[in-house]
Amino acid sequence: MPIELFYDLGPKARDTTLTTADHIAALDISDLDDVQRLDDADEDQPIIGPHYIKVTPDQKHIVVADYFTQTGDIELINTPADFNAQYIDIQPDVGLSFNCSIGF
């Protein structure tokens, strides 16, 4: 049985990984007949290599750990690390607001 594409995130997601593109793509799937994209695909987000992403229990915020290991020349893809966590607001008008960066 062929697999059906649920949602097309666009060329940034197709042509690279979102981690190396330094981008968070977020979808509201509360209504599967009307999926809403929460992020702006063309926005430059203040994030480097998003890895761990967690939505808060009240579903009003996203907590993201940016890339936090620096592998140097031994890795195939050497993503720069910024050693930050992001606390991002999910806007009621379908959007993301990057309002807090926490260094670690």
Image: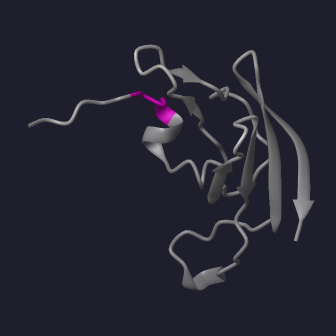
Q: Is residue 104 left or right of residue 27?
A: right
Q: Identify whether 23 is placed above or below 75.
A: above
Q: Is residue 18 left or right of residue 6?
A: right
Query: Residue 81 location in percent, x, y?
Result: 75, 68
Residue 48: name its quadrant: bottom right
Residue 61: name its quadrant: top right
Between residue 56 and residue 42, name the one nearer to us.
56
Q: Which residue is drawn at the image coordinates 52% and 25% (left, top)? A: 30
Q: Which residue is drawn at the image coordinates 83% and 62% (left, top)? A: 84
Q: Is residue 95 left or right of residue 19?
A: right
Query: Residue 70 location in percent, x, y?
Result: 70, 78
Q: Quadrant of the N terminus?
A: top left
Query: Residue 90 location in percent, x, y?
Result: 75, 31
Q: Identify whether 102 is placed above or below 21.
A: below
Magenta-colored segment: predominant secondary structure: loop
Q: Identify whether 45 is placed above or below 54.
A: above
Farthest left residue in view: 1
Q: Which residue is drawn at the image coordinates 64% and 81% (left, top)? A: 71
Residue 59: name its quadrant: top right
Farthest front residue in view: 58
Colour scheme employed for the rendering of this structure? one colour
Between residue 65 and residue 18, name the one nearer to us.
65
Q: Quadrant of the C terminus?
A: bottom right
Q: Would residue 66 be counted in the magenta stretch?
A: no
Numbered disc total: 0
Query: Residue 39 location in percent, x, y?
Result: 66, 29
Q: Which residue is drawn at the image coordinates 40% and 15% (left, top)? A: 33
Give the residues in magenta. Answer: 7-11
